[in-house]
Image: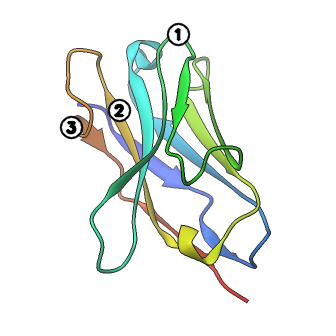
Amino acid sequence: QVQLVESGGGLVQPGGSLRLSCAASRSIFSRYVMAWYRQAPGKQREWVATITSGGSTTYADSVKGRFTISRDNGNNTVDLQMNYLKPEDTAVYYCNARTSAVPAGLGSWGQGTQVTVSV
C-alpha cells in the first residue's frame, strides 16, 4: 500500500489556475503509475490524467491542453497543473497510485482535495 496525501485545492475564478500536489509514502514511487481522478457532486469519479513510471502522459479530452501532470521521483510527488479552469472542473480531486500490473481505477487513493471554480 502507498499512502497518498493531496494538497493545493481551493477556490479560483474561471480562467484561473491551480496546482495540485500529491505526496507518496513509498520509496519505490518511481515504479508506480500515477493518476489524477475527480468526482463532482452527484457524479461518478472520472479519470483526469495519468503519468507512467517512464514519464508518458495521457489526458481526458475534457482537460487536454489545459492540465499538465508531472512527477518528481526524487521527492515522491506528482503534480497536476490546472490552467484555464472552468466551472465544470469543480470537483474533489484524488491522487491514485498503482503498479503496472494493477488495472486502472484500482490501487491506492488519497483523501482528496476540493477544487471549486466560481466567480
Q: Amino acid at mark 1?
A: Gly
How far across and how far down the image is residue 17, in percent? 76, 61
Mark nearer the N terminus (3 vs 1) = 1
Above or below, 60 relative to 119? above
Q: Dot 3 lies on which element?
A: loop
How far across and how far down the image is residue 35, in percent? 43, 37
Query: Which image quarter is the N terminus in?
Result: top left
| Residue 83, image quadrant | bottom right
How far across and how far down the image is residue 6, in percent? 49, 52
Label 3 sits on residue: 106
Mark nearer the N terminus (3 vs 2) = 2
| Residue 115, image quadrant | bottom right
Kindly report the distance in space between the C-alpha atoms of the residues bearing marks 3 and 1.
Answer: 20 Å
Name the mark nearer the viewer: 2 or 1.
Answer: 1
- Residue 76 got which mark? none
Name the mark nearer the viewer: 3 or 2.
Answer: 3
How far across and how far down the image is residue 10, in percent? 63, 72
Label 2 sits on residue: 97
Q: Amino acid at mark 2?
A: Ala
> Which residue is at 55% across, 18% downward?
56
Q: Amino acid at mark 3?
A: Leu
- Residue 54 got which mark? 1
> Which residue is at 57% across, 16% downward?
55
